[in-house]
Amino acid sequence: MTLARRSSGFLKPLSTACSSSFLHRRPYSTDDTTTITVETSVPFTGHNCEPPSRSVDTNPKELMTFFTDMALMRRMEIAADSLYKSKLIRGFCHLYDGQEAVSIGMEAAITKKDCIITAYRDHCLFLGRGGTLLESFAELMGRTAGCSNGKGGSMHFYKKEACFYGGHGIVGAQVPLGCGLAFAQKYRKEGHVTFTMYGDGAANQGQLFEALNMAALWDLPAILVCENNHYGMGTAEWRAAKSPAYYKRGDYVPGLKVDGMDAFAVKQACKFAKEHVLKNGPIILEMDTYRYHGHSMSDPGSTYRTRDEISGVRQERDPIERIRKLILAHDLATEKELKDIEKQARKEVDEAIVKAKESPMPDEPELFTNVYRKGFGVESFGADRKELRTTLP
Amino acid sequence: MASIFQGVGAATSLSSSTSIDTKKFHFCSRRSRSERKASFVVVRSGGAKVENRIGGRAEQLVTNAVAAKADTPTAATVSKPGHELLLFEALREGLEEEMERDARVCVMGEDVGHYGGSYKVTRGLAEKYGDLRVLDTPIAENSFTGMGIGAAMMGLRPIIEGMNMGFLLLAFNQISNNCGMLHYTSGGQFKIPVVIRGPGGVGRQLGAEHSQRLESYFQSIPGIQMVACSTPYNAKGLMKAAIRSDNPVILFEHVLLYNLKERIPDEEYVLNLEEAEMVRPGEHVTILTYSRMRYHVMQAAKTLVNKGYDPEVIDIRSLKPFDLYTIGNSIKKTHRVLIVEECMRTGGIGASLTAAITENFHDYLDAPIVCLSSQDVPTPYAGTLEEWTVVQPPQIVAAVEQLCR
C-alpha cells in the first residue's frame, strides 16, 4: 500500500508509481498525517484476556486504501464467479466476497515477514499479501502465468516472498502447518508471528486442538484466526458445534471475538494479538464475518439460509459500505470519486482477465517438473573414497 | 540361439540409447520408462565374459547419468580401523553428525528428548542440543507431523519420528497431501526437506496394530522418497542422505534390527538414496529383498549354497524409486527373480516391483517372477502363528529350488 508522494493538502494531483494491481490516484485526499479516530461497530469480547479498546486510529490515506483494495477484491471475486459460470475456471472455486475486511484489516496491522496460512478461500488473502490480479486469474484458469504455474488451482495460491503459505484443500490440515511455521519462527528467534486461519467448520477438527495444545505448551507465536461465517459448507454453526463460541474453545488459550465485517476492528485485534503472542503464546481470534456466495461455486448458498438473511447482512454490515460511509462522513472524497474508484477496479480486473486468457496452458513436460526438488539431488560417496561418487541431476 | 537373440536385443537397445544421450537429461522418471529400458545395459568390470548356466553374452556400456559404474564395490567396504556399534547407535551417529553440521536440523517426536527415544536412537541429544531442537511432542501424530512440515516450509529440516510406523497412519493426510504435494502445487516455491522415520515391521509378538508395514500404503504418494535400512552401515549412510536431501524422505527401520552389531568406517560417508546394495553376487537367481527379510534370505542362501545354487542377493534399500539399474543388471545376468519381502501380498512393495520388472525386463526373464510376501492377515499375537505370517528361510529355499528347475 505504498504511495509515490505524500500530499499535505487536499485534492492535489499525484503521480502514480505503484504496482499494476493498485489504482491510479485520483485527486482525493490521501494525507497520512491527520489522525482520524474511528470507533469499532461493537466492543471486543475477551476470553481470558483484556480486550483492546474500541477506538482505532487511522488516517485518510488508510481509509482510501481500504476502500480501493476492498473494491478490487470484491470485483475479483465477482469476476471469478462469472468466469466459473462460463467454464473458464473449473473444479472448486471458493469465493471470499463479504469477508474482505478480514484480509484488509489484518494486512494493515502486520508486516510482510509475518506469515499467513489459510484454507481454500484464499484469493483475496493472496491479493492482500501482494499477489497480482494476473497471477490470480491465470492460476484460476490453469495457465502458466499463475502463481503456482497453473498446477495448483484455486485452492493452492502461495507467495513465498510475502510469507503467504497458502492455499490448502483439506479442512483443518493447515492449522498444524501454521503451528509449524510459528515453531520455525520461534526456532529462528525472528520476532515475527504467524496468522493461522481456519473456518467455523474446521474449528471442530481434532488436529486444531492438538496443534493448539502444542502451541500453548511451547509458547509459539501462533495466532489462530477463526473466520466464522456461520456456515460450515452447508451446515449452520449451531447444527455442527455444541459450543459456537469459537474464541472460548481454546480454554486455557485466551481468545477475542471481533466483528469481522469491520476492517478497523480486525486491524485493532490483529495488532493486539501480535503484541500478545510475542510475549505470552498463542491466542484465538474469532472474526464474526459472512460470505455472500455459497460455500463454493457448486453451492447456490440459498438452500440452508434465506435470501433475506443474505441481503440483510449486505445492507447492514457490508464492509465496503462501512468504509464508504466513513469516507463520506469525514468528507475525504465525493460519491462520484468513490464510484470512479470502483469503475477503475472493474477495469483493472477486466484487463487482468484478458491478459490471463492470453497466457498459455502449461505443456506436457511441466507435468513432471517440481515433483521432486532438483531431480533427486543428493551427493553421495562411500567411506573408502572421499571424492564424489555420483550426483544425480 | 539364446545368445543371438540377446545380441539383437542389445543392438537395438544401444541404438535407442544413443539417441537418449543427445537429449538433455531432464528428470522425468515416469515418462522415460521406455527410454530407461535401454540404459540398463552395462559393461561388466574389465569387460569379462559372463559364464552362467544359460550362456555367456557380450554386453554394451551405456553412459547415462543414473548411478555409479559397476566396478565400484558396494556394501560395507570396511577399512579395518573402524568402530563397532549397534544399528540404533549408527542411526544416532548419523543424526548427531547432521545436527552438528547444520543448525536447521531438528528432531521431533514422542519421547525423543528427555526419555532418549523409545529405541534409544535420540539418546543424549536433548542434553546436547536443547529442548527446542530435540522436541518432545504430545501424542498427536497428525498435528506434529503437520507442524514438522510447516517448519520445513519455513526452512528448517525436521526429522519426524513416529514411535512406531503404524502410528503414522494418523498423519497420513499430512504426509500425503502436504508433505508430498506442496512442492508441486506451489509451483516449486516451497521445499519440504523432512525425514519421517520410525520402526515398523513384524516384531516379537507385538500384536496386529503394532506390527504394520506402511511402505505399501505410502508408496504411491507422489513427491516422497522411501528408503529402508537394514545394517548399521547403511542405516547411518541413509540417515545422513535423507537429512541432506531436499525432498521428503521416509526412512523405514525395523523393530528387530536395532541391536545388530557391525563395524563401520570412521570416516564420514553418505550413501545414495536411490541405490540398491549388492549383498552377495551370484549367477543363478536374483533375490530382491529389503529390511529384515535380508537376514532371512542370507540364512536361506547358506542352505542354497550347500545345495549347489548360487543366488545373487540384492538389498533394494530404495523402495521409492526402485533402483532398476542394479536390479536390471542382475536380471540380465541371472534371468530369474525371487522377491522376498515382509509387506503384505496385496498391493505391497513386491507387487509394484514385480510390475516394474515385468514392464522393463520381460524379455530377460526365463521364468515368472516369484514374490514371497507376508500373508494378508492382521499379525496374530501367538508366536507360532506370527512365524507363519512372515516368510521363513525354508520357504525361500523351496522357492529358489522351484525357480531354478
Image: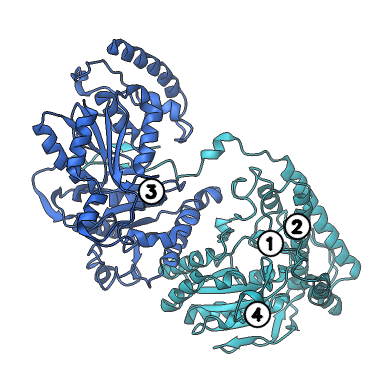
Chain colours: A cyan, B blue
Q: Quadrant of residue B66?
A: top left
Q: Position of residue A238 (x, y in %)?
A: 66, 78
Q: Is residue A330 left or right of residue B191?
A: right
How far apart are the two marked residues, 1 and 4, measured between alpha carbons?
A: 20 Å
Q: Judging from the image, what secondary structure is the residue with disc 2 in?
A: helix
Write down the residue under mark 4: A268
**Label 4 packing within 10 angstroms: few (<14), some (14-19), many (20+):** many
Same chain for the residues at labels 1 and 4, yes or no?
A: yes
Q: Residue at x 11, y 38 (%)?
A: B302
> Could you tell me which chain the residue with mark 3 belongs to?
B
Identify the amino acid type marked 4.
Gln
Q: Could you say where residue A340 lies in the image, as x and y percent from the top left?
A: 87, 62
Label 4 is found on which chain of the structure? A
What number is the disc on residue A76? 2
Q: Nearer the viewer, mark 2 or mark 4?
A: 2
Which of the two discs, 1 and 2, labels the residue nearer the N terminus?
Answer: 2
Q: Secondary structure at mark 1?
A: helix
- What's the mark number on residue B216? 3
Which of the labelled discs sits on residue A124, or is there none?
1
Quadrant containing the C terminus of chain A is top left
Q: Quadrant of residue A229?
A: bottom right
Q: Is residue A31 visible?
A: no
Indicate left or right for B360 with A104 as reference.
Answer: left
